[in-house]
Amino acid sequence: MRIIVTFLLVLVSALNVETLFESYIQLSQLSSQFQPANSIELLETQSVSSFMQCGYICNRNIQCRTFDYNSSSMICRIFEGALDTGSIVSAAPTSRVGFIKYSSLYFIAINQPCTQCIESRYLTCLNNTCQCPAHSFYNGSQCENQRYENASCLNNDWCRQDPFQLLCSTSSICIAFAVYWNSTGETVAGDAAGTLGIASNRLNFPYGLKFDSSNALYITDYNNNRIQKWIAGASNGTTLAGQINGAWGQSSTFLNGPVGLVLDSNDNMYFSDRANCRIMFWTNGASSGSMIAGTGIGGNATNQFQNPSMIEYVPSMNILYVADTFNHRIMKYFLSNASSGIVVAGGNGQGLSNTQLSRPYGMALDLSTNSLIICNYGAHTVVRWILGANSWTLIAGSASGTGGNSATLLYQPVGVTLDQYGNIYVADAGNHRVQCFLVGQSSGITIAGVTGSPGVSASQLNAPYGLILDNQLNLYVADTSNNRVQKFARY
């Protein structure tokens, strides 16, 4: 395949190079090398025999945009940085820079099915669609490198997130992510004083939280056997599923301890009806639901649950993941044929080994790593289980199962969620706090509640179970034993 090699302004020659994809490469003059905006942009260094071999290595790496080669030392360096972020600087007479030219024609398959970019050197398959490679964003014409701190931006995708966790500020400037939340919570549902009840302005052991398409808050009101919708600023909730009076039952109009909840794009609800050992589907606006998984009788067969808790839904594949808590496993259900499930994590009895789980309550699906983040309540840990793997890796807590209240330990974690940067937030129920674990960190930062101090003041929590972030990263916490939902505003 033919690669056209040019100087920055002057055409030099056409060279035949065996390669996977066609690319157009421009060269700097001799006595130059590339200086990236940040050293993290260096992808690899190799010793090769020629400049064209160096170009070949760059062209095979979808993230590579620039390379330099010193014919004296025979060192080839390839970078994900480009001239719009880095620069060309003076170097030895035997060194020069090459960079791959980009055109909007290479990106016409963006957001199309992956079949449209199988042979592309410029796009990658992510979540079944053609997307920009890691550390780049689509600017409306082509994929461009994500920008660094103080650079201009239009949204968070423009700013380098891994590992710098930059976000686009209201001033359209990339700024560093900061772990700052107001330590004083605002009661947005239930009674601020913690009084439980069945009235529409009360909750009784709130558990799971989700936002609908209008940003109304949905709450699984566990001990009231119902699901409540709470519009922002309202003083009362509306019952969407179950009985207004809190009565429990097994029919299609009754619930018995709802816990995990997800919504589809039409605000139809999927939720775990824990004490009934079943998963229910409830059409938006309906007065009754249908059982789509489980049998309604507890058990450990692949078509049964034993006190299921949190759930996750993948609409593009119509797949439901269920934390089958007292069977110590996570089940996967294809809802097109949900007569039985598949064990995807645990299922080897309760225990502390990396092939076992111990009462998994909370769970979050991390599509970027194709993994489940699991709150291992009985082992006082949060673990990552890559789908298809047969064991977990530790994220937070002690692998020995030791509980505690230090920054590196947890005690009975229940709920977990992620932000768009991959940071993990844990409802550390037994410690009455919410911990934030930044990407790659095993030491948590308390962002809500007071460690080891349950209470009903605005700065305290009492056994928080569920949590969720809105699109501004404000934190909402099911302050379960205080029978309320608290909002902690992010600065």
Image (cartoon, helix red, strand yellow):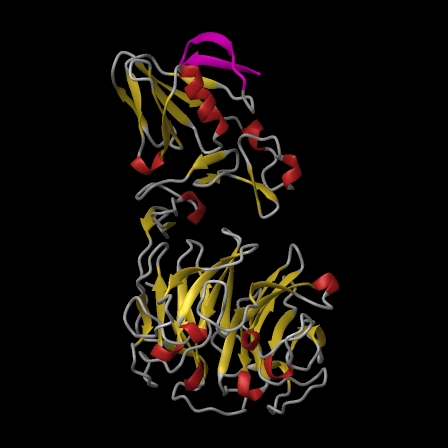
Give the magenta part as a residue range.
1-18
Residue 288: x and y in percent read 71, 80
The x and y percentages for residue 124 are: 55, 38
Q: Nearer the viewer, residue 76 or 104?
A: 76
Q: Residue at x 54, y 91 (%)?
A: 198
Prevailing SS of the magenta stretch: strand
Q: Is residue 408 above or below residue 155?
A: below
Q: Quadrant of the N terminus?
A: top right
- Whether residue 38 appears in this view of the structure is no
Left or right: residue 410 versus residue 141 is left
Residue at the (53%, 70%) spot, across then down: 210
Q: Percent position (x, y) of residue 282?
A: 68, 74
Q: Residue at x 54, y 21 (%)?
A: 19
Location of residue 326 in the rendering, given as x and y in whole percent from the top left corner? 55, 77
Between residue 274 and residue 252, name the one nearer to us: 274
Q: Quadrant of the C terminus?
A: bottom left
Q: Is residue 469 left or right of residue 240?
A: left
Q: Quadrant of residue 293?
A: bottom right
Answer left or right for 409 relative to 237. Answer: left
* Quarter of the rendering containing residue 456: bottom left
Q: Image height check: is 126 above or below 464?
A: above
**Residue nearest the observer in this picture, 258 or 388:** 388
The picture quadrant where one finds residue 486 is: bottom left
The answer to whether residue 106 is magenta is no
Q: Is residue 392 above or below residue 451?
A: above
Q: Which residue occupies 33% across, 47% down?
A: 164
Total number of numbered labels?
Answer: 0
Q: Does residue 175 appear anywhere in the picture?
A: yes
